[in-house]
Image (tube, rainbow, N blue to C red):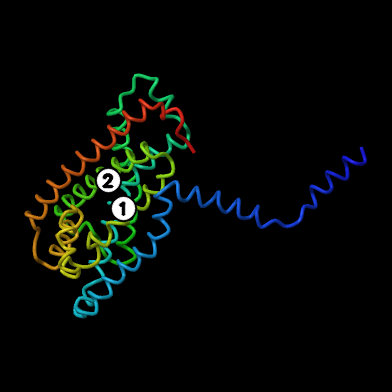
C-alpha cells in the first residue's frame, strides 16, 4: 500500500517535459492543418482591413472634394452593406442552429422536404434583416438628420438585389458546411467580408487597379453601390446597373441552390446528417 502511494505521488510530481508540450502542439497543428478554413482565417482579417482602408485612403487622397459630400454616402453604404451581410448571415445562422443542436437527423425523418426547409431559411433571413437593419436606419434620422429612405424607389431595387445576392452566397456556404463539416463554420462570417473590397462599398470601381475591375463587375453588390452613389450625387437611377445586377443574382441563387442540394444529397448518402453537430 505504501509503495502504491509513493508511486501515485511520484506520478503527480513528474518533471517538466518538453515532449508533452510538443505532443500537444502537434495536436493543435494537425487540427489547423486538417481544416483549410481555419488556416485561411489567420490570413483573412489583416489582409481584408488592409485592402478596404487602403483603397479608401487612396480614393480620398485623390479626390479631396469628395470629403465634403461623403457623410450621407458613407452612411448609406454602411447600412446597405449591413443589409447584404445580414441577409446572408440570417440564412446561415438559422441553418447552423440546426447543426449546433444536432437536429438534422430528426428533421429529415419527418416528411419535411429540403426545398421546404430552404424556403423557411429564406423567410427567416428576411425577418432577421428587418429586425436588424430597419431600427438602425430609423435611428439615423434623429441622430444624424439623415434618412436612407429619402432615396425612394431606387432603395427598394438596391434592397432586393443585395438580399438576393446574400441568399445565393448563404446557400453556397451552407452547402460547403454540409460537405466539409463544422470546420467550415467560420465561412458563414468570413466569405461575405472577403468580397467587401471588390464590392466597392465606400469608393468607386475606378479606384481599383484596371486588372481587378472586371472581377468587381462580376458581383451584383458592385452595381448597387455604384448605383447608390449615382442616385445620391444627382445622377439618377441607373436602370442598366439594376438589370445587370438582377441577372447576376439569378446566377448566384441558381449556383448557390445547386451547391446546397448537391451537398445535402451527398451528406444524406454518407449518413453525415446524423453525425454533424457542435
Left of 190 or right of it: where is 166? left
Q: Closest to the observer: 89 or 207?
A: 207
In this orientation, which residue lies closer to the viewer: 141 or 70?
Answer: 70
Q: Work out how far the residue at label 1 is from the one at label 2, CA to CA, in angstroms.
A: 8 Å
| SS state under label 1 | helix
Residue positioned 30% across, 72% down in the render: 54
Residue closer to the observer: 114 or 264: 264
Percent across and percent down for residue 48 are 34, 63
Q: Which residue is mark 2?
A: 169
Q: Earlier in the sequence, mark 1 or mark 2?
A: 2
The residue that appears at 39% across and 65% down in the rendered structure is 46
Q: Nearer the viewer, residue 45 or 147?
A: 45
- Judging from the image, what secondary structure is the residue with disc 2 in? helix
Q: Residues within 10 Å of mark 1 (few under 14, many from 20)?
A: some
Q: Position of residue 157 (x, y in %)?
A: 16, 50
Residue at (16% x, 63% y) in the render: 213
**Quadrant housing residue 167:** top left
Q: Answer with left or right where residue 266 lies relative to residue 221.
A: right
Is residue 103 toward the left or the right of residue 127 in the image?
right
Q: Residue furthest front?
A: 19
Residue 192: mark = 1
Marker disc for residue 15:
none
In the image, is residue 65 above or below residue 128? below
Q: If the image is split into quadrants, where does the N terminus sit?
A: top right
Q: Residue at x 39, y 42 (%)?
A: 93
Name the spot of residue 174 as percent of width and height, x first: 34, 40
The part of the image, by quadrant, that contains residue 43 is: bottom left
The residue carrying pointer 2 sits among few (fewer than 14), some (14 to 19) or many (20 or more) residues within 10 Å by Cα, namely many
Q: Residue furthest left?
A: 240
Residue contact between numbered discs 1 and 2, judged by CB atoms under 8 Å: yes
Question: In the figure, is residue 257 to the left or right of 153?
Answer: right
x then y, percent, for residue 178:
37, 36
Amino acid at each position: 500500500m505504501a509503495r502504491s502511494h509513493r508511486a501515485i505521488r511520484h506520478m503527480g510530481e513528474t518533471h517538466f517535459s518538453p515532449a508533452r508540450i510538443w505532443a500537444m502542439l502537434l495536436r493543435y497543428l494537425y487540427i489547423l492543418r486538417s481544416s483549410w478554413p481555419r488556416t485561411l482565417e489567420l490570413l483573412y482579417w489583416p489582409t481584408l482591413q488592409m485592402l478596404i482602408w487602403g483603397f479608401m485612403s487612396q480614393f480620398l487622397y485623390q479626390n479631396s472634394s469628395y470629403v465634403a459630400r461623403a457623410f450621407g454616402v458613407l452612411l448609406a453604404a454602411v447600412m446597405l452593406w449591413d443589409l447584404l451581410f445580414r441577409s446572408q448571415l440570417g440564412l446561415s445562422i438559422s441553418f447552423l442552429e440546426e447543426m449546433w443542436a444536432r437536429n438534422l437527423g430528426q428533421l429529415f425523418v419527418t416528411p419535411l422536404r429540403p426545398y421546404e426547409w430552404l424556403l423557411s431559411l429564406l423567410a427567416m433571413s428576411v425577418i432577421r434583416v428587418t429586425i436588424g437593419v430597419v431600427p438602425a436606419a430609423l435611428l439615423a434620422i434623429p441622430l444624424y438628420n439623415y434618412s436612407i429612405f429619402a432615396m425612394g424607389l431606387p432603395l427598394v431595387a438596391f434592397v432586393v438585389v443585395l438580399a438576393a445576392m446574400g441568399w445565393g452566397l448563404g446557400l453556397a456556404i451552407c452547402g460547403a458546411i454540409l460537405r466539409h463539416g463544422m470546420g467550415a463554420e467560420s465561412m458563414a462570417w468570413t466569405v461575405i467580408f472577403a468580397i467587401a473590397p471588390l464590392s466597392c462599398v465606400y469608393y468607386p470601381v475606378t479606384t481599383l487597379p484596371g486588372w481587378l475591375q472586371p472581377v468587381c463587375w462580376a458581383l451584383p453588390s458592385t452595381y448597387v453601390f455604384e448605383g447608390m452613389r449615382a442616385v445620391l450625387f444627382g445622377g439618377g437611377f441607373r436602370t442598366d446597373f439594376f438589370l445587370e445586377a438582377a441577372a447576376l443574382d439569378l446566377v448566384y441563387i441558381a449556383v448557390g441552390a445547386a451547391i446546397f442540394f448537391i451537398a445535402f444529397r451527398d451528406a444524406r448518402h454518407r449518413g453525415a446528417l446524423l453525425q454533424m453537430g457542435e
